[in-house]
Amino acid sequence: MALRESLAYAETPTRAVATNAAKAKQRQPRRVSRQVARSAAVVVGILVGAVALWEGYKAMGQLTGDVIPFTSIPLPVSSSDYAMPHIWVIFDALMQPANAGTTQSLLVYYLDQTSVTLREAGYGLVIGALIGVVLAVALREVQFLTRGVLPWLVISQTIPLVALAPIIVVWAGSAGMPSWIAVTVIAAYLAFFPVTVNMLTGLNAIDPIHDEFMQSINAPRWFTLLFVRFPTALPNLFTGLRLAATASVIGAIVGELSAGTGLGIGRAILTAAYYYSNAPENLFAAVLIASLAGVVFVQVITIVEAIALRKRTN
């Protein structure tokens, strides 16, 4: 009888733990959904705020004659329709035909060009992330590389992109490569650095107790790296990926301007700038679509992060 009571008493905490684990597992999808919804709400709030600031600035400039209220200091940007079209004028331009010879709307045309840019940026992000992770591991495991290589990695990011992009385009052309490869290389060049820095920070951020335990059992360095340091570094990795996603889109757009591909939202922006005097709203529409594409790209990384780290947040 006493043995049975002891067994029942021992099973009670086990059942409680199992019940709590089951409840936590049921809450995981809801937490991920809430995190995604929260991110979407932040993006929508920023967009609404940007529209309010744009229209408010324009209204103030038209009321004051493009000077700061109660002063004679001119506003930094004119509020005229030529310099700052109304938001509804920009959206109306997106619904109009892209050119006189087609029924395709400007919105569909820009989205089609944006898909090209996002594909190049995606390739660059994957390549840059892989290079960044490999470099971070090398810098972590080979100490002299930290002192000898890391400063040069920092210096590499100080080179103006508008000067570097044409060089990469020329080299790719000399090697007989298509122009989209040059654009992908430029995107990867901007993407690898934030991944390297954040991943290295995460690899060095393990709990000292865990490190001491792995040393006490004489675990190989690769074992500690794979099963302790890598899981610890995941949140830092996703932070670097979000930064790299934004950088890769910027790199792809700049690369398209230099490569002369004829495709991509970067070329569409350049074309709209060329015909700015005829339709200034088209340029703002192209920039708007490019900006939203970058936001969507980052939000995809955020969703992947929420799914990958859902157990950890519990």
Image: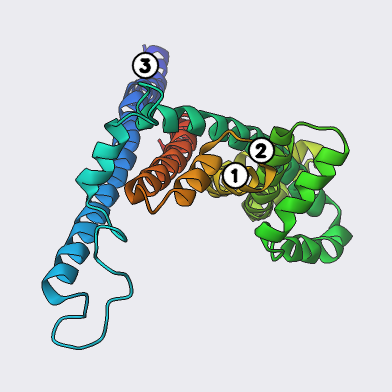
**Can residue 176 be spotted in the picture?**
yes
* Residue 307 in picture, x, y percent from top left: 46, 29
* Amino acid at dot 2: Gly
Q: Residue at x 41, y 22 (%)?
A: 14
In primary-sequence order, the first of circles 1 and 2 is 2
Q: Where is 86 relative to 289, above or below?
A: below
| Residue 291 in the image: above or below residue 15 | below
Q: Is residue 66 left or right of residue 171?
A: left
Q: Which residue is mark 2?
A: 124
Nearest to the observer: residue 60 or residue 92: 92
Pick whichever of labels 3 and 1 is earlier in the sequence.
3
Q: Quadrant of the C terminus?
A: top left
Q: Which structural element holds mark 3?
A: helix
Image point 11% across, 71% down: which residue? 63
First-in-chain label (3 vs 2): 3
Looking at the picture, which amino acid does disc 3 mark? Ala
Identify the residue position indicated by label 1 in the image: 248
Mark 3 surroundings: few (<14), some (14-19) or many (≥20) residues within 10 A: few
The residue where tag 3 is placed is 8
The part of the image, by quadrant, that contains residue 160 is bottom right
Q: Tags 3 and 2 in contact by the CB under 8 Å rule?
A: no
* Identity, as a three-letter code, of the amino acid under mark 1: Ser
> Which residue occupies 29% across, 40% down?
38
